[in-house]
Amino acid sequence: MQILHLDEHILVLNKPAGLPVLPDGWEKDAPYLVKMLEADYGKIWIVHRLDKITSGVIVFARTAEAHRSLNIQFEKHEVKKVYHALVEGSPKWNEHTARHPLRTNVGHKHRTVVDNRTGKPSVTHFRVLKRFGGFCLVEAIPETGRTHQVRVHAAALGHPLVGDALYGARVTESGLDTPNGHGLLDPRQSQISRPALHARALTFAHPVSGETLTFRAEYPEDFASALANSERGL
């Protein structure tokens, strides 16, 4: 784990993919982020979460006062979260805002689904950063914080995240079947075997000083490798 910022009030780090923030219900003895951090830094408070499969910037509070301040910022949508993702296909748009209402925790896989009748309002702003024939690097800025929001909105637009079989990525026995004319983008080539989502940046006000802070996390090795191979047309 890469610590991006540490003071007596907050801790900001670049979370590795594959490590849950809290223990999974069926793997209570497995390592998880909060337990590991508290072993080194003492009591911490959770402000927001990243999925187990997602890498990138996450902030924790180190005091109850900082926790309250950051919670208020998140509740008022004053925090800016920027994600980068590799998605299948090449959108017809360069920028698009997804507003599909979402309903969470559906079925035994606890999926999030679009539900125009009972779903909660959800908004994600997408922007294409680079195109690679059959797939793209996109920026996603969610206004709301529904579970799996970026993943579901991308899939609802017809462009699921590379590697995201839960939400419609095309998977074969050999790997990910992409429509880019180069056959398969399999895990041995892309070196990414998870949904290709990275929390790139986080902007918020320091809970004590009030200073506006922005933290950015470099891509992890698997995401960077997949991106590099995409650029080479592999």
Image (spheres, rainbow, N blue to C red):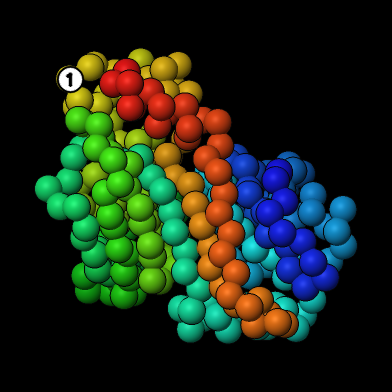
Horizontal and vertical percent for residue 102? 32, 66
**Amino acid type at mark 1:** Gly
Residue that numbered label 1 is attached to: 181
Above-or-below relation of 11 to 185:
below
Q: In this rendering, does residue 51 appear at all? A: no
**Identity of the residue drawn at 31% across and 69% down:** 123
Horizontal and vertical percent for residue 121? 31, 75
Q: In this rendering, does residue 149 appear at all? A: yes
Horizontal and vertical percent for residue 139? 35, 52
Tag 1 secondary structure:
loop
Residue at the far front in the pictured view? 211
Side of 52 relative to 37 (left or right): left
**Identity of the residue drawn at 21% across and 60% down:** 96
Give the tally of numbered discs.
1
Which quarter of the rendered picture does the N terminus lie within?
Answer: top right
Horizontal and vertical percent for residue 21? 65, 54
Which quarter of the rendered picture does the C terminus lie within?
Answer: top left
Side of 110 relative to 115 (left or right): right
Above-or-below relation of 196 to 66:
above
**Identity of the residue drawn at 72% across and 82% down:** 208
Q: How crowded is mark 1: few (under 14 residues within 10 Å), some or many (20 or more)?
A: few
Side of 55 relative to 21 (left or right): left
Q: Nearer the viewer, residue 204 or 170?
A: 204
Above-or-below relation of 178 to 26:
above
Q: Nearer the viewer, residue 221 or 187?
A: 221
